[in-house]
Image (cartoon, rainbow, N blue to C red):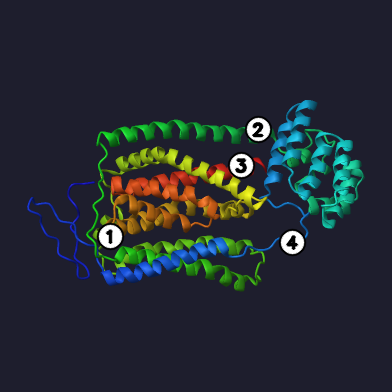
Amino acid sequence: MQNEQPELEPTFQEAPQTEASDGDAVARPDPGSPQAALIAWLLGVFFIGAVFFTNQFTPKPSAPAAVAGAPSALDAFEMESKMYVRLAASAMADPATKAQTLSTIEALAAKPEQRLRVAFVAAELGGTKKAIDHLDALENDSTVSEDIKAQIPLAREAVSNDPATLSDDQKTQLKKDFGWFGELSLVRGLADTDPLRKSVIGEIWSLLLLGLFGIAVAVVAIFAGLGCFVTMIVRMAARRIQPAFEAPAPGGSVYLEMVAVFVGVFLVFKMAMPVLLGMIAGVGKGGEFPSWAVTAQLGAQWCLLGLVFYPLARGVSWERMRHDLGWHSGKGVMREIGAGLFAYFAGLPLLVLAAIITFVGIIIKTAVTGAKEPPSNPILEMVTKSSALELALLFTLATVWAPFVEESLFRGALYRHLRGRRHFLIAAVVSAFAFGIMHGYDTFLLLPVMTLGFVFALMREWRSSLIGSMVAHSLHNATVLTLLFLALWALG
């Protein structure tokens, strides 16, 4: 950080800045009062808890009663089946490869409706007899519901006959009831070069592109992460890493007020926008919103950006707010960007550890509760249903809006307020916890988000400027979304 601080204008009834005996400036409290800080704490905790509650416990739209309907775009079994069928289709009709692929898909089919869909894959990879055996076993299973058994006759017709002999009504019903699996049955026997077959099965090169990109990301993450982590430890041990953050004296409240106001308005926005858009679009509770309504909600979120300038409305000068929130160039923009990337990669081992703990926790939860579905991911659900414009808005929100707003809020304002009263590790943990639970992921998926917030808080302590953490935040979100977009594109 630059040795000379900007001249700060007094606001509210701040304690005057005094001089120490050696000439250095003594830290002064942020604008505001202890009474206002107490109120902001109470409101902030309430609003953040309310956001967490709505994220975790608000009932999701219920699924149709018929469990054997076409799988959704998020169906993990369908995605896995698409990938394996495409790999088998590229193996030049190697019977051993096809048999191994079919065995793998059979092992993945844990639920009765998945076992029903396996019959279509069996017809493609193992032949009609193999498919009929699957259907016979399902039909004779007393634990299978009548809803699923009612769809076996149509499946039997599809796997037993030439697709060309099926009526138009049967073809339509196959697509409706079984989605991609029904489409797979309709291209069985067509030449690999047939455009219709290629549109259903896909081409192997898209999977290869996904694999290469994934490998490249993994290699960079492993080598850069380990290298930066070790370098960071060595430099810290040699005391070559010195914190540039200047903690305020206790007593202020304005930046805690900023957090409470933002989260409160965000909560109202989160709850009111779907209701308002539903009224405008004429959509009832649990109904499907039109595309324009989703686009409007994503675009409207940009309006919340103005809330991070709350201190200006409370009388804090622009120069002081920039200094306090970390909106300054530190030791130079390029140096801050480089330091942010270095610290981000150094924190990747912590992120990987958090991901491993999360994965183990999900396995334990599944074993204890018997849950058969993985935790929901709202971003994944949104991506699979979004138009190109909505995807563009989502990408800019994740790579521009979130890095600026979330870093300003949690590392700029909340961390600063906490740091004036507590050790930097306590401030980092608390701000990271608040950052994590504000996200709409399943509880079991929040630990990696909190870990990321913890790493960003340590960047704030080290550099004072938010440039590094903003750039790292943007890079992280861009990489994750690019991998997600590429995976969904590759799997059709």
Q: In 3D space, how far apart are the residues under numbered discs 1 and 3 (Cα atoms)?
A: 42 Å
Res 434 visible: yes
Amino acid on which the number 3 mark rests in the picture? Ala
Q: In 3D space, how far apart are the residues under numbered discs 3 and 2 (Cα atoms)?
A: 12 Å
Tag 3 secondary structure: helix
Return the residue at label 4: 64
**Would you say the residues marked 4 and 1 are in contact, meaning their CB atoms lie under 8 Å apart?**
no
Disc number lying in front (4 or 2): 4
Return the residue at label 1: 321
Label 4 neighbourhood size at 10 Å, few (<14), some (14-19), many (20+)?
A: few
Q: In 3D space, how far apart are the residues under numbered discs 2 and 1 (Cα atoms)?
A: 51 Å
Residue at left offset 65%, top offset 70%: 285
N-terminal of the two: label 4 or label 2?
Answer: 4
Tag 1 secondary structure: helix
The image position of residue 279, as x and y in percent, is: 61, 73
Residue at left offset 14%, top offset 61%: 17
Q: In 3D space, how far apart are the residues under numbered discs 4 and 2 (Cα atoms)?
A: 36 Å
**Would you say the residues marked 4 and 2 are in contact, meaning their CB atoms lie under 8 Å apart?**
no
Q: In 3D space, how far apart are the residues under numbered discs 4 and 1 (Cα atoms)?
A: 52 Å
N-terminal of the two: label 4 or label 1?
Answer: 4
Amino acid on which the number 4 mark rests in the picture? Pro
Amino acid on which the number 2 mark rests in the picture? Trp
Label 1 neighbourhood size at 10 Å, few (<14), some (14-19), many (20+)?
A: many
Q: Which mark is residue 205?
A: 2
> Which image quadrant for residue 160?
top right
Return the residue at label 3: 487
Residue at left offset 85%, top offset 47%: 138
* Count of marks overlaid on the render: 4
N-terminal of the two: label 2 or label 1?
Answer: 2
Q: Could you tell whether 83 is left or right of 459 in the image?
A: right
